[in-house]
Amino acid sequence: MDPRDLCAEAVAGVLARPLRTALTTLGTVLGIATLVITLGVAATAGNRIVGRFDELTATAITVEVPQSEDGPLVGWDAPAELTRLRGVASAAAVAQNEGDTDLTVTANRLVDPTRVSGRNLAVVAATVDLPAAVRGRVSAGRFYDEGHVLRRDRVVVLGADAARMVGVSRLADGPAVFIGERAYSVIGILSDLGRDQALSTAVIVPPGIGADFGLKDVTRVLVNTRLGAAELIAGQLPRALSPARSGELHVITPPSPTRARDAVEGDLNGLFLILGLVSLVVGAVGIANATLVTVLERTSEIGLRRALGAARRHVAAQFLVESTLIGLTGGVIGASVGVVAVVAVAAVRQWTPVLDIAPVLAAPAAGALVGLLAGLYPALRAARMEPVDALR
Amino acid sequence: MAEPGTAEPVIRLVDVDRVFPAEPPVHALRGTSLRVAAGDYVAVNGPSGSGKSTLLNTLGLLDRPTSGRYLLDGIDTTTLPDGERTRLRGGRIGFVFQSFHLLQHRPVLENVMLAEVYRQPPTNLRKGRRARAAQALERVGMGHRADFPPNRLSGGERQRVAVARALLGRPSLLLCDEPTGNLDGHNTTLLLDLFDELREQGLTIVVSTHEDEVSSRAGRRVRIIDGVLREE
């Protein structure tokens, strides 16, 4: 039998009962569409979350510097050196006491029993690049510069929350804060921190006077890289900061984008994939059932074909091709519906639709396979019919 | 036509039995022997349940005798495997059924073309098939109905289409099982006229019927009662 004849006969058989064929196709359409939508929406949602990660945290690296008896591991000049690395956008060194060693900070020496005037706030020493390194904004006044550091000026910059707590809102009248017994001029307020938000409640002092509070050595280095350079820079940082004892530094890198994506998809997909597969199985049962009914209905046609010289395998092949065609059609329609649905969902939520091309292309093949499997038993039944009985 | 015995007959049944297993067993054919030479026009008579259909099915290779031999064009079919019998059936036998067996959703021409689909190469060529089918339709006087769906034709016209389908591919034998069973008198006459024409063109025809008008037009009549075949 000419394969083209086989296809022509199968197509004619499928088109002979358009309504039933359409209803039979529906099961596969639903199954395939569910699968494509599941994969597409998960990928789209995953991409959205990863996109947010990318902008803010994927470029942020923190290096923890352990305190050592044998002198500092990282010097205060290290951030300036770091910016020479290609890919480093900004860097700052920070010294902060471990544990609960906050100091009492007040805006004046008056003892007002009706108000809480003294606050226990963290005091942090940081290099002049801190605003850039924490991606913050100096909302009032200015940040200290190298001049302040070298002159060991007694100036401080308050984090926005710290300023509110001690009651400093304006810098025009040159406010001061008392840390312990000594007064320091407040020259700026740092707000809108993009990272290390804890610094918002801290009093930030230049490295030179940090020693007054036991902040002698660098405990942390904050580094921002250009997009995509985080992993490379993370590998180079320890050696650049402390060539001799690089192994003792602890580098905290952002989670890599691929890991974030995997985690997101893993959560969302499992259940819906099972749902899609169940729909597909239901679709297959639908095809099997409809094809079986068709076989029984077309008994006399089978008999006629046998009388015209069709072998059992020709009859089986015809019904197999018919059910495969139905599955294939369902796969194509299902994939199309799925893609449209993913785009629609993305449009409504204002996400960027992301859809791997592979499952979309594989969907029709999967539908055809479902149809083929579903057609096996009915085709066998058709092939087994005796022509004499079929023609009766 | 050649004398019996000198040339190979189209049909040679030798002592054929067909027993259907049942309690008690049904003997549909008993010791049936039959020779049909090329160009013969044979009517098989008999009441329903007499074994007519079993005989036709056996001749059409749709059923296999329990014992005895059946030679079609000199080929012993009783020992052939299923596949070979199917091939022989497709290539050498044209069927006409009482209920026409036309595919309702295909136009007349495609119904006729279907006869070539399952043939062995080179007789199944797609090229020219449409023309050959149209020619077969012309031969039965149905050329003007080629694009009609079968359900818009009268019973007589449908049976002509079925004959055209059976003729496509030049079979050695035309087997007609109660071809006029669903036709009125006028259409029966027209169909029998067509059979006469075909016989004149040299086709071998075996018709089963219980209508006298049909059997009287045949050149030779055999009668089957309770599985036993007799010449009339």
Image (cartoon, rainbow, N blue to C red):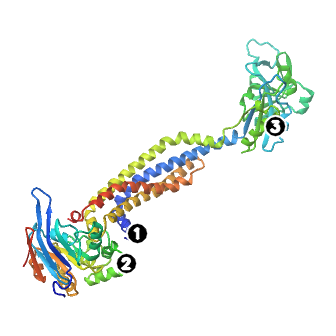
Residue A340 appears left or right of A20: right
The residue under label 3 is which amino acid type?
Ala
From the image, tell me which residue sits under label 3.
A240
What percent of the width, then of the height, locates residue A241?
81, 34
**Image mark count:** 3
Q: Is residue B37 above or below residue A372?
A: below
Residue placed at 40% from the left, 69% from the top? A3
What percent of the width, then of the height, locates residue A357?
56, 54
Q: CA distance from mark 3 to mark 2?
A: 82 Å
The secondary element bearing badge 2 is classed as loop
From the image, tell me which residue sits under label 1.
A3
The residue under label 1 is which amino acid type?
Pro
The residue under label 2 is which amino acid type?
Pro
The image quarter containing residue A183 is top right
Nearer to the camera, A144 or A67: A67
From the image, tell me which residue sits under label 2.
B122
Within 10 Å of disc 1 (Cα), the crowding (few <14, some 14-19, many 20+) is few
Residue placed at 14% from the left, 79% from the top? B42
Q: Is residue A302 above or below residue B190?
A: above
Within 10 Å of disc 3 (Cα), the crowding (few <14, some 14-19, many 20+) is some
Residue A304 appears left or right of A225: left
Residue placed at 93% from the left, 28% from the top? A151
Q: Quadrant of the N terminus of chain A?
A: bottom left
Q: For the residues carrying marks 2 and 1, which lies nearer the camera in this image?
A: 2
The secondary element bearing badge 1 is classed as helix
